[in-house]
Amino acid sequence: MKAWWTAQDLAMQTLPGLPTTKRKINETADQLGWGSRTNASGQPLARARKGKGGGMEYHYSVLPVQAVAALVARGLVVNLDTAARPIVARSELWAAFDGLPECKKAVARFRLDILKEVEALRQAGHSATGAVAHVVHLHGLKFRAGEGKEHKFSVQTVYNWQKVVRHLSRGDWLPALVPQTQGRTATADCDPDAWEFLKGDYLRLSQPSFESCWDRLTDAAALHGWALPSAKTMKRRLDTEIPEALRVIAREGTEVHARMYPPMVRDRSQFHAMQAVNADGHRWDVFVAWPGRDKPVRPLMLAIQDLYSGKILSWRLAENEGADTVRLAFGDLFRDHGVPELAWLDNGRGFASKWITGGTPNRFRFKVKKEEPVGVLTALGVEVRWTRPYSGQSKPIERAFETLCDHGARHPAFQGAYTGNSPMAKPEDYQSRAVPLHVFKAVVTKVIAQHNAKVGRRTRVCRGVLSYDQAYEASRAGAVIRTATEAQLRMCMLAHEGVTAEKRSGSLRLFDNVYWAAFLNEHRGEKLIVRFDPDRLHEEPVHVYSRAGAYLGAAELQAASGFADATAAREHNRARAAFIKAQKDQLAVERRLSASDVAALLPELDEDDVAPAPAPRAVRMITGLGSLGGAAALAAEADPIRFDDRYAEALAREQRDHLRLVE
């Protein structure tokens, strides 16, 4: 029996409550401060080891209660007395008890009840021996706990329990009475280098099987002379000594390991309707016949969702996610619902474009320059928050996309055009047809409307009763929401630069459509900038700006009509006549003096004030008139006003006579 133990000695004993390796025991000693503990007399309970190797030795009293009890049961240390009992913190004692299985806790409770009954009998006047004997006889010498297993005890067993708790307060008896049996304690030798080899081979992202690692370990052990236990022992050691989190991060990577940490619970009920939105793009798994494309495409939908209610407020379809699509989607949001205070966006190229979030100091894509233009969201005072890439938890709209994919992409109208959600999930009728764009838009519009109107949504706001629409409208009724002006809405439209106004009327031609307004007469032949909504070219006017960026006005669409459409012709003539009449009326207002009134205001001219015509510096003789030369000269002198006409007639007559002679 000995009182002082090294870390190596403790590791070889495989004691309960202690690690089984020397390195881990040294780490435990550092964490629990074994080296600084003292006994009741102030003597240290740790000392430098004498002899070769050095190191530290620890008094057994610094060990956990379970470990000390195991050493006592094995006869390796003397039984505890008052002077040498282990100094164990109550928190450590109860922490060890809390980590035990329920079957051992039940045994400890039974032992505590036995000791309480013994104490009650002694207080009633029984002797110590008589009290213990009576309690043992009363309980039939056995206790049934956990899966029907019987635990026998005797009078001597009760005496042993009393010794364990002798120096403890009554409140700490329960954890001290936990059974200290450890089952088999025999261990097999394993060379430390072999253990490190196995960990280095097994804990890799290639995820090799344990069998293959074991085969390589046996080959290396034969080469280096390493002692090995059985394969099952090494596998069990891997599972017990290497925590699950470490095995996951080593074999499956940090992304999978991050999922072991629960996502943050985000409460969106703190907002009100239209206070905050989030937006993202979704690529539809449907082939669509896109105008101007020879091959079908999978459209991208950029959608904006209200964070409070979960309602999808606006959306646009495009071939790819770009700044133009983002601009139009937010334009729909501003026009139909208002301007939000906050917007959660991902860091995609479309959202991080300078035309959308230019001027935002925390933009993480592209270089932020002082001279860059102010983006649409920045100009309207929308505070932009950026989300982590590929993080569905920070963008609730990702959950909505899953629902839309199920109800929309697999819609019966898209049969044969559905692509599957991965290259390995292609349906048998893959790419057998492409859906027309107008059909695709109609189905998507209906699916989104149904998504917003479905009642019984299980969110904090809807409470399993309301729909997204109902929650949105109920909150919007009492909320203060900013609205966008016409000038702000025009900022969200697409700009087409360098459109030349027609030289005669000033009309503009855009995408085979003709637009005109009266103010364009002032800009005939000029190059102008046109802002427009590509999806509403036939429903809304286009807005015209000068090259300097000044707003000029709105130009309406001039609808084409059939060549023989008399009704359309009459309407056009009536509109033109009204335009001409309006211009004449405006001219009458502007021109108050006639030409005769203007002439009357001029000073009168006297004949003497008229200066004679200056004499010519040289006189040229008229030739080439033939026999008419003299007559022409006389005619010119007699009637100079009619000379030109007579000369032309005579010349023509002479040419006709000459042609007859030639024939």
Image (cartoon, rainbow, N blue to C red):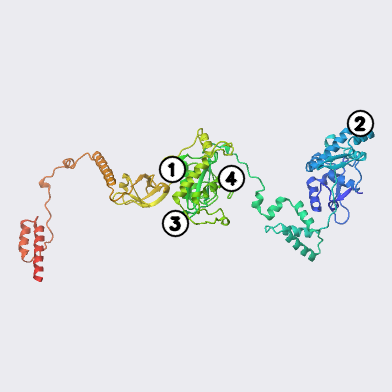
Residue 394: give its label: 4
Of tags 4 and 3, which is closer to the observer? 3
Q: Earlier in the sequence, mark 2 or mark 3?
A: 2
Which badge, 3 or 1, is on the more N-terminal residue?
3
**Residue 645 in which image quadrant:** bottom left
- Residue at the spot of label 3: 293
Q: CA distance from mark 2 to mark 3?
A: 98 Å
**In terms of secondary structure, where does tag 3 sit?**
loop
Q: CA separation, marks 2 and 1?
A: 91 Å
- Left or right for 488, reference 117: left
Q: Residue 198 at what x, y percent from top left?
A: 75, 59
- Circles 2 and 3 in contact, beta carbons < 8 Å: no
Mark 2 vs mark 1: give the one in front: 2
Instruction: State the image coordinates of residue 440 (x, y, percent, origin top left).
Output: 47, 49
Amino acid type of disc 4? Answer: Ser
Name the foreground residue: 615 vs 590.
Answer: 590
Q: Quadrant of residue 103?
A: top right
Q: Looking at the picture, which amino acid does disc 1 mark?
A: Leu
Q: CA distance from mark 4 to mark 3?
A: 35 Å
| Mark closer to the observer (3, 1) | 3
Marks 2 and 1, the one that precedes in the sequence: 2
Residue that badge 2 annotates: 122
Residue bearing the label numbered 1: 489
The residue mark sitting in front, 2 or 3, is 3
Task: Identify the residue shown where x is 43% and y is 45%.
Answer: 491
Kindly indicate whether the residue at mark 1 contacts the one at mark 3 (C-beta within 8 angstroms): no
- The residues bearing labels 4 and 1 have C-alpha atoms spaced at a distance of 28 Å
